[in-house]
Amino acid sequence: MAEVVLRELAARAGHADSLVVSSSGTGDWHVGEGADPRTVQALQARGYDGSRHRASQFSTADFARHDLVVALDRGHERVLRSWAENEADRSKVQLLMSFDPEGTTRRGPDVPDPYYSDAAAFDDVLAMVERACTALFRQIEPALRKGPL
């Protein structure tokens, strides 16, 4: 969800070619699979296209390719930081909800996994992700406007 939302925010602001957004998990159990149909449906209902997403697994080499590594919950945050080989890479790992202080105050720092819930839970999670991604994009967009260094 977050990958699709952030990519769309960048495209709507004219920065589709300036921001590289990717999504990967800490485990390999869904590599190559599409998003859960309830995720795709929730995204589609809000005007996003999640149909092309394919799961991949994060690797330590990804730290060198990314300026920011966003974790959706504290468990993933711990795993990602433990995989970092230096403090610079560890500092790249941030919780998505940390960009939305209002959401963090209300629900805590984790984006809940709606997998074992009903379709309505996917809509609720998408709303959280949209708020946090919008706040994150507001922070990085000024640098995108400036262009490459």
Image (spheres, helix red, strand yellow):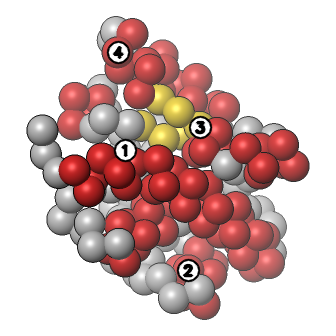
Type of residue at label 4? Ala
Label 4, residues with CA under 10 Å away: few <14, some 14-19, many ≥20: few
- Helix, strand or loop under label 1: loop
- Helix, strand or loop under label 3: strand
The residues tagged by marks 3 and 2 sit, at their Cα atoms, a distance apart of 21 Å
Give the labeled residue for mark 4.
88
- Vertical comparison of 112 with 105: above or below: below
Q: Where does residue 115 sit, x and y in percent of width and height?
A: 70, 63
Which callout, 2 or 4, points to the residue nearer the camera?
A: 4
Give the labeled residue for mark 1.
57
Type of residue at label 3? Leu
- Helix, strand or loop under label 2: helix
Q: Where does residue 137 sit, x and y in percent of width and height?
A: 46, 56
Type of residue at label 2? Leu
Give the labeled residue for mark 2.
43
Q: Where does residue 126 sit, x and y in percent of width and height?
A: 65, 69
Give the labeled residue for mark 3.
95
The residues tagged by marks 3 and 1 sit, at their Cα atoms, a distance apart of 18 Å
Q: Is residue 136 visible?
A: yes
